[in-house]
Amino acid sequence: MANTFNVERREEGKVIVLSLTGYLDAHTAPVFEKAIQDEVAAGRLELVADCAQLSYISSAGLGVFMSFIEEIRGGGGDLKLAAIMPKVYQVFEVLGFPALFDIVDDVPAALKNFADGVRPAS
Amino acid sequence: MASVEKTFALHVPSSTENLSMIRDFVAKIGAIAGFDEKEVMKLELAVDEACANVIEHAYGMDTTREVKVRALLDDDKVQIEVVDTGKGFDPTSMASKDVEQLIKERRSGGLGLRLIKTLMDDVQYEIKPGEKNELRMVKRIKKS
């Protein structure tokens, strides 16, 4: 059934990779919110959302990204998005996310951008 | 020859845990209509946003109410109606803000509405607060 969502966490050096699996909607968004909140509270501000297994996102999920990005970038970090599948990417596109976020093809590209200090101008 | 119209309906309790059941229902409708994967996703998302708005804003997260989703199919289009008996909203109050403003204000209801209008071909509202509010969305079936 189309309602499962979970977040798996791993460390790649200083960077925390959060792998999102399943359906991120108004019901499951609090799970994602807590996962990011835990990292931000601990001062871990270099984050990658690995979206390779993310099957669906609605405005509730998009809102979680938006609600933390200012605080994360203000602290010198970033929340990068990797490996978004095409049918999900169209949703990010509709709300202008490519202009606001560093969206890359895969996790290694996100890690490289952290290493090279690459982030969007906004 | 007039095309035959088929009607499908789903009533669920007003809890966000039922959004996935609503999406499954809408995905089946999209498949019957012959939409491809990306178009089915748009249909699912638009209805999800509409129902989430009802649950969160029209009903204020009261899980004892009901959300009704009705789908009408004919040869030319899919029309989805989301009906509630909650407090309604003013669609014109969101209309003037741009997307970045809506995002910054994090008013998910406004963002959801903006998504619905982008994802669907036509959107109409009929608001009678406390009585019956109806959101009608249409996606046309492209003939190849």
Image (cartoon, coloured by chain):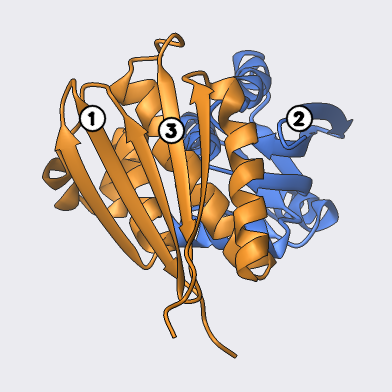
- Badge 3 crowding class, 10 Å Cα cut-off, few under 14, some 14 to 19, many 20 or more, is some
Tell me the quarter of the image containing the N terminus of chain B: bottom left
* Parent chain of label 3: B
Marks 1 and 3, Cα distance to the nearest angstrom? 11 Å
- Label 1: few (<14), some (14–19) or many (≥20) C-alpha neighbours in 10 Å: some
As drawn, which residue projects farthest toward the bottom?
A: B144
Instruction: Describe the element under mark 3 as helix, strand or loop.
Output: strand
**Which residue is identified by label 2?**
A4
Circle 2 — which element? loop
> In this rendering, would A27 be left or right of B84?
right
Label 2 to label 3: alpha-carbon separation: 23 Å
> Which amino acid type is marked by label 1?
Lys
User: Residue A27 at x, y = what percent?
Assistant: 58, 24
Viewer-nearest residue: A70 or A25:
A25
Q: Nearer the viewer, residue B43 or B136?
A: B136
Residue carrying label 1: B132
Picture disc at residue B87: none
Residue reaching furthest front? Answer: B1
Question: What color is chain B drawn in?
Answer: orange
| Residue at x 52%, y 25% (from the top left corner) | B12
| B128 with respect to A85 (left or right) | left
Q: Which color has been applied to chain A in this rendered view?
A: blue
Where residue A33 sits in the image (x, y, percent)?
Answer: 59, 23
What type is the residue that disc 3 sits on?
Lys
Q: Is residue A88 positioned above or below A11 on the image?
A: below
Q: Chain of mark 1?
A: B
Q: Which mark is residue B68?
A: 3
The x and y percentages for residue A88 are 64, 56
Task: Looking at the image, tell me whether mark 1 or mark 3 is earlier in sequence order.
Answer: 3
